[in-house]
Image (cartoon, rainbow, N blue to C red):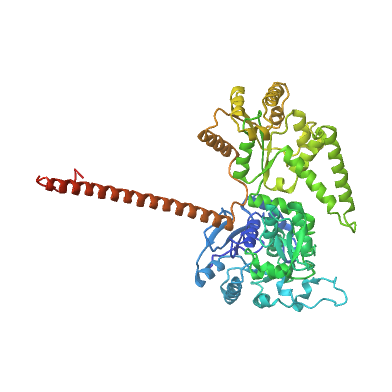
Amino acid sequence: MAEPRMERGGHTPKRVFINNTDSYASKHIAKFLSECELRPPAGPEGQTKTGDEEDGVVSLQNQRAEGAFQLVGTASDPPEEDRGFVMEDYRNLNKDELLSRLMDCDVVIYNVTQHADQVEEASWAVSALHDRISHFSGPKMFILISTVMTWACSKPVDPEDPELPFTDEMFRRRRAHRNFKQHIELEKRVVKMGKTNKNFPTYVVASGLQYGMGEQILHFFFKTSWLGQEKEIPVFGDGTNIVPMIHINDLASVIQNVIELQPKHHYLLAVDDSNSTMKDVVKAIASALGPGTVQKKPFEEAFLVQDWSVMEIDSLLVNLRMESAHLKAPFSVNWSCESGLVDNMALVVEEYRQTRGLLPVRLCVLGPPAVGKSTVCKQICQHYTLHHITLIDTITETISQLEETVQNADPDGDNDDSVAEAQEQLASLKASMERNGGILDEQQLVKVLKDKLTSNPCRNQGFVLDSFPKTYEQAKELFSAEEHDSEDGTSSYSKNITPEFVLCLDASDAFLKDRVMNLPERQVQEHNYGQEHFLRRLATYRESNMEDITVVNYFEELDISPLYLEITSSNEPDCLLLMQKIFHTVGKPRNYGPDIQEVEREQRRRAEVRMKREAMEQAEEESREAEEARQRAARWEEWRSTRDKNLNNGRPPVQCRQLTKREV
């Protein structure tokens, strides 16, 4: 029998069960609830207790560190990450064992928004608990987290006014999508079970499509945008469908309110206020992380996305305008994104980066000419999947993009402002280069480079800035924030583009001169390493680094300590040691790593290398065996020839004996 527990109004943390704690939604709901603090006791619908009962609030404040809820739950796999917020994980329990765990809890939460196989278990759980009400030691609550897909085929509120939303009060009119018939039957069962006994209140929370905290269904759009490999992000279908949504932490806050307030309404819609179309959502994601453009594709192509189940595809194609009427007073939802994903995209993108560890790696590599900066930059970029930023490439790319914008201007004039701005900037750059013999003014050079560093690819993956800035003033101008004066009077800088790591390569003048002299003529011409020009550049570099204020001083003022690396050899082992030191300093990559296709390609490549090596070894073995056979045959022929010759000359034949193992 379950252990006795204090009823509502006591100060003991509630024991809360939630299924599938290793799934996206359940995990974040459990984590949110585990961090909730004890509140002053409240009656139904949030009526705060008065009189002597309020005196207990003081003692509550001393117990806040313990938390309001103790989380337990089922999990399908051993955790890949720390889930310290779950006190107990249950795996592979039979129904009797699971029911015993449920009876130990004050609140039982079943989330069926992700896994259809949980619908049957949730139906069994609510029925089994209902059958054992007489054995309860105190009230228990059952909360079903369902999906708005049970409304997907509902008739419009008013056929003549499509703007009218569905609300919680209309739940009896809802009609489910054909793939969610089991869900709506479960919802009805849960609501019905809660009407028979006040010791077993039940609630259905119909959740919109969940987003935030690293993403789940929408992760495909976030990842595709972040990787930057597509010029346009796909929108499946016409994109005009309105998808009800809610931030996962807002959904968790709704669950918290249900537990604490025990509202009189037993069916609740959990959606934000956005009512955004799918195209608006994808466009906002593409603008924040990717190319900023989208392309409509047939909805059938959504089934080609390996990350999505049929349930999830249905959720992306639903068209419902909804409003949560019951989430206002007395609920006190601590909204993260009440106005929706599109309006709060910056917040959600930052959550996505932090949750998945997709943090940019930013480096700056400095040093004299011919020290090997570009080679080091390329190896760093290859190891960390970063963008190699050079002045020449950035200027060329900028001019090319501006010319493309001007040439592909919309004749209808929908983007007149952006085209005019591109024309003006292009003319300014070309005029500057004509005035300065193909070189940009420093102010324009810094602007072009700053625009590159603030672009989405550099903000997503990071960059390696090659051989720039060269002076303190260039660094100050390039990395300065929009407002140059900070509150404490010091010069502020942009944390989004300022390098985390500064590598200062150096070598003796004799080593650098010798390296240039031994370069192939093609590389000498490519890098403009003619003797006179190289010596002038080297002298300029040495002179600029003898000044009191250098580019290195700028980084030191920001508490960015440069890593000084002395180059004394061009031998491969020494270069490998140099790169290992850099990789150790920078740390592990902060990106997705290879996807399944890349892993398969690498496995095929390794298999091909292994097969070639084995084939070569086999060929060598066969060649060696053939050579040994040839030599044996030659020796045998020589022995036989000698024997025949001796016989012809009347000499006795050579006596042969078996060789011992030592002689062999």
Side of 290 where 28 appears, left or right? left
Report the number of numbered marks.
0
Image quarter of residue 582: top right
Q: Residue furthest front?
A: 648
Which residue appears at 57% of the width and 58% of the height?
Answer: 596
Q: Nearer the viewer, residue 309 or 540?
A: 540
Q: How far from the left and from the top, in percent, is residue 163?
A: 85, 70
Q: How far from the left and from the top, in percent, is residue 258?
A: 70, 65
Side of 472 where 104 appears, left or right? left
Q: Quadrant of the C terminus?
A: top left
Q: How far from the left and from the top, in percent, is residue 162?
A: 85, 73
Q: Nearer the viewer, residue 215 or 183?
A: 215
The answer to whether one can see residue 63 in this image is no
Q: Is residue 164 above or below residue 465?
A: below
Q: How far from the left and from the top, in percent, is residue 306?
A: 62, 64
Q: Nearer the viewer, residue 647 or 77?
A: 647
Image quarter of residue 433: top right
Which residue appears at 75% of the width and 78% of the height?
Answer: 172
Side of 408 where 45 appears, left or right? left
Side of 278 where 575 appears, left or right? left
Q: Is residue 568 above or below residue 78?
A: above
Q: Is residue 582 above or below residue 472?
A: below
The answer to whether one can see residue 161 in this image is yes
Image quarter of residue 46: bottom right
